[in-house]
Amino acid sequence: MFLHNHQLRYDREVGGTRPAPPRRHTLLQRVTRAALSVFVVASALYALPANAAGLSGKADTFLTKRAARGLMTGWTSVIVRIDGTLTAQRKAEMRSLGCDVYRQLPIIKSVAVNVPNRMLERLAALPYIKTLSADLVVKKTDAFTDTHSLASSAWSLYPKLDPTHVLVGIVDSGVNKVSDVQNVVTSRSFIAGNTNLGDECGHGTHVAGIISGSGVSSTGTGFTPIRGVGYNASTLKSPILASLKALGADGTGKVSDVVAAMQWLLKVAMHDPSAGVTLPSDVRVVLNLSIGHPVAESYTTDPLCQACEALWKAGAVVVCSAGNGGRLQDTVDANLDNEGYGTEYGSINSPGNDPYVITVGAMKNMDGNRANDKISTYSSRGPTRLDLVLKPDIVAPGNKVISVDAGINSTSKSYSWLRGTHPGNLVPQREYYSGTKTLTPAYYRLSGTSMAAPVVSAAVAMMLAKDKTLTPDTIKARLMLTADKWSLSTGVADPCSLGSGYINVTAAMSSSVVATQSALSPNLMQDSLGNVYISIDKAIWGTKAIWGTGVTDLRAIWGTKAIWGTSDNLLSSSRAVWGTGVWSDRAVWGVDIFGADFSATVFGGE
C-alpha cells in the first residue's frame, strides 16, 4: 500500500517545500507560535466549548468516525473546502491549530491539510470552513474489448476517422512509452517527491493500451494483432494521451494528488496556455479514471466528484470505473444470486457515484459469442450510497482483458510492480503468435471495471473523431440510448447491475440524438412497500423529454424489461434490492483505499 509519509515534500503545484508533521521547534519558535495563537485566533477559539461534540455536520463519514474515537495523538490528511479565499489571517488561524497546508486545489476551492487529530473539531468549527473530506488513499479498480464492444465494426464504417485531435488524460500510475504506445504527448507526475514519470506499477500502461495500443508488437506473419479500441488500423492513428501520474508503484495514491492532476487537465480543456503543452487548437479532452474509493459523503461535497464536475462543465467527457465490489461475499453459496456470491448493491465507488460522469461496469466473455456475455460478479452495483443515484450508466468488456505490458521502466530500469508480483499474467505468445520465434513478452492480462472504463473512453474518442462538436451530455445520452439492452442470467433486467446496457460503439457513432440539458444519471426512490422508482425530476426530464433529447420513454434508456409494464418509472427489478441496507446505509465502510484495485479477481478474472 502506497502511503504518503510525513517528510519534507516539494509540491510542484504549490511551489516551495512543505514541512510535514511531526515538526520540532526551537523555544523561540514555540513562543512565537503561541503568541500568534493568542493574538490572531483568540476570538475564533474562545467561543468553542471545551467539549465540542462532532464535526458540525461539515465532515464526511470517515472523519466523523475518526473524531468519535477521541484521538489525542496522530495526524489526519483532509481536504478542506474554503468559503471565499484563504487569506493570510485564515492561514495563520489554521497554523495555530497545528494545521499544515500541503496542496492548493483551486479546481474545487479547497486546500489539502494535515491536521492533528485532536484539532479536527476545532478546524471544522472555523466559520469559513465549509466541508472536510478525508484525503483518502485511493486504489485502481481493474481481443475481447474490440470485438465485443462492436468498435471494430465502427472502424469499418468510418475508416478515415482521425482521432488525433482527442486527448485522453489517464490519471493513473503513469504510462510507459512502449512499442505499442507511442502517442503519449506529455507525462507529468503529481506525486510530490516522485520524479519518475514512467509507470512503476503497470496499471496505467495497461489502461493506455486498451484505449489506443497500436498492436505493433503483434503485427506480421503468424500474428493475431492485439490493438486498442481507439486505434484506427486504416490510418494508423489513435487518440493522443496525457500520462498524469497520481498513483505509486503499487497502484495507490491520495485524492489530493488525483485532484491536482485533474486540475491540470482542466487547463487543457479550457485551452489555458499555462498548462504548458502544445496541442491541436481544437483538441477535445476525455478523462479516464480507472480508480476510486468507497463513498464516504454525498457527491455534492466529495472532492473527486466536484473535480469531475468542473471538467465535465468545461466540455471534457469524464469516464469512471464502477468499482469491483459487486460481490456480497468471496465464497460461493448455492443459495445466493450473482453466481453464488450474492449481490452487493450500493457498492459503486467514488467518483463513479457522480451523476454527471459516465460510470462503467464490467462484462465477461463466456464463449466468444457476444450474445452470451454476462455481467462480471465483481462489477459494482448501484444505486450509489447516500445519494441513491442509478448507476452504473453502461457496461463494457472488462474481464481477462489483454493489453500492453509496461515493459522496463526507463528511469528505474526495472519491470513494473505488476509484472514482478504476478508474472503469471503475462500473455503467452501462443495466444497471439503461431510462429516459432521466441518473443519478448509484450502483453499482460487484467480484469476489472478498470479495464472496462478505457473501452468507453476509447469509444468517446471515436465519437469525437467523427464529430468534435459533441457535448459531454450528448455523448452520454447517445451511449446510453444505443447500448444493447441486457439481462442477468436469470432473465431479470437490473439497471443497478447493467446500467442502460452493453456498449454498442457502432450504434453510438450512428446516433443523431442531441441532449439540450445536462445528462445527469437519475436518483432512485423507494416507497413503503419496497418498490423502487426512477425519480423523474428536472435533472432527467426536460420539457417532457429525457435530458431534452426528444426521447420521452424511460424504456429507451434502460430497456422494456427494466421498467414495469404498468408504470412509467417503476423498476421491474425492485425486489432485487428489497430488504438491503442501501436505502438507509449511513455506515462507514471498512476500506479507505483509493487507487487501483488489485484483489484476486483482478489477476484471476472469472
Image (cartoon, rainbow, N blue to C red):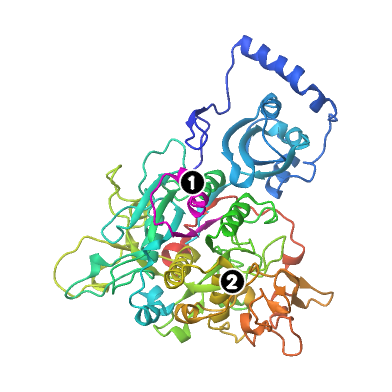
List the residue tagged with mark 2. Answer: 393
What is the quadrant of residue 418 in the picture? bottom left
What is the quadrant of residue 276 in the picture? top left
What is the quadrant of residue 208 in the picture? bottom left
Q: Is residue 374 above or below residue 318?
A: below
Q: Secondary structure at mark 1?
A: loop
Looking at the picture, how far across and down is residue 156, in whole percent?
35, 81
Residue positioned 80% across, 27% down in the render = 45
Pointer 2 with pointer 1, Cβ within 8 A: no
Looking at the picture, how far across and down is residue 34, in whole percent?
71, 16
CA gap between label 2 and label 1 equals: 30 Å
Looking at the picture, how far across and down is residue 154, in whole percent?
40, 79
Query: What type is the residue that disc 2 sits on?
Result: Asp
Query: What type is the residue that disc 1 sits on?
Result: Met
Q: Is residue 169 above or below residue 394?
A: above
* N-terminal-most mark, 2 or 1: 1
Q: Secondary structure at mark 2?
A: loop
The magenta segment is 264-292
List the residue tagged with mark 1. Answer: 1
Residue 104 belongs to magenta span: no
Q: From this viewpoint, which residue is outermost toward the bottom?
A: 565
Q: Answer with left or right where residue 407 lies relative to residue 97.
A: left
